[in-house]
Image (cartoon, rainbow, N blue to C red):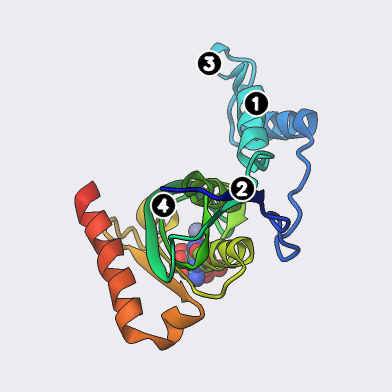
Amino acid sequence: MSTNGVRPSATAHPGRAAPQPTVDTPRVTGLVRELLIALGEDPHREGLLDTPARVAAWWCSFLSPDPSAMATCFTETHASDQLVVVGGLNVWSLCEHHMLPMKLDAHVGYLADGTVLGLSKFGRIAQRYAGRLQMQERFTRQLADEVTTAIGSEDVAVTVHGVHLCMSMRGVRMEMARTSTVQAGGRFKTDPLLSQQFLTLSTAELRGAA
Ligand SMILES: Nc1nc2c(ncn2[C@@H]2O[C@H](COP(=O)(O)OP(=O)(O)OP(=O)(O)O)[C@@H](O)[C@H]2O)c(=O)[nH]1
Ligand SMILES: [Zn+2]
């Protein structure tokens, strides 16, 4: 591939994204200790001694946005009206209703027309929006919005297949329940052939991963 230039996107962190909360690690540690007590546990027993600090450290890493998640774009004159689909973007997020994990498998498609986005950046953007209390629909939209901003074009589509533990390990207890969301913009909304190509490639990628 001939790369004619590199330009970090000036809008790598669009204003639409809610600011990430700062984690008060000592406070979280104390609250987890309190939670253990409220659950009838003894936080001083050997197996639980370091648990509050471990849980707080996990929250800290989960909620900390990756500062290197710059949406680096390249000018690529050979990519003209080319459909690019990046799939297998698997991330763990937390359902904001139950604070239980949801596993999200995202696929992003866009029409490269003179500008391409660094492949790893799709995963980094997905990781950043997954690392917070989320809803699948919002995650899907945020991923699509940020790619749209990064490449400077509305021709972006995102599908996300989600498995929600709040639906399998509790509640309705449906282990096989899967949720799929699609966000389509620009020509993906108006061109049925393009839309179909995107969905076919997303599905092919899914089959390949199986
Ligand atoms: N739309 C949407 N709903 C979600 C998502 N994650 C969890 N939920 C739903 O959020 C809803 C919360 O419903 P509530 O009735 O307030 O909570 P609940 O009594 O625990 O509900 P049940 O899960 O049915 O036991 C549930 O239906 C969940 O399935 C998500 O990403 N998107
Ligand atoms: Zn939930």
Q: Which three-letter amino acid code belongs to the residue tagged 2?
A: Val
Q: Any atom of ligand 2 within 8 Å of the CB at mark 4?
A: yes
At x 61%, y 22%, the residue is 42
| 56 relative to 171, above or below | above
User: Amino acid under label 4?
Assistant: Leu
Instruction: Give the mark nearest the N terminus, 4 or 3.
Output: 3
* Mark toward the start of the polypeptide (2 vs 4): 2
Q: Going 72% across and 66% down the picture, which residue do you hit?
A: 16
Q: Residues within 10 Å of mark 3 (few under 14, many from 20)?
A: few
Q: Which residue is mark 1?
A: 52
Q: What residue is pinned by disc 3? A: 47
Q: Residues within 10 Å of mark 4 (few under 14, many from 20)?
A: many
Q: Is residue 146 found left or right of 193 in the rendered image?
A: right
Callout 3, which amino acid?
Gly
Give the SS element for disc 3: helix
- Name the quadrant containing residue 37: top right
Chain-order first, disc 4 or disc 1 = 1
207 relative to 44 in the view: left or right: left
Compute the Cα span from label 3 to label 1. 11 Å
What secondary structure is found at the residue carrying circle 2? strand
Which class describes the residues within 10 Å of circle 1: few (<14), some (14-19), or many (20+)? many
Q: Is mark 3 within 8 Å of ligand 2?
A: no
The span from disc 1 to disc 2 (Cα, nearest Å) is 44 Å
Inter-mark Cα distance, 4 to 3: 26 Å
Marks 1 and 2 close (CB-CB < 8 Å): no
- The residue labelled by disc 2 is 6
* Label 3, label 2: how far apart the Cα atoms are: 51 Å
Q: Which residue is mark 4?
A: 165
Closer to the N terminus: mark 3 or mark 1?
3
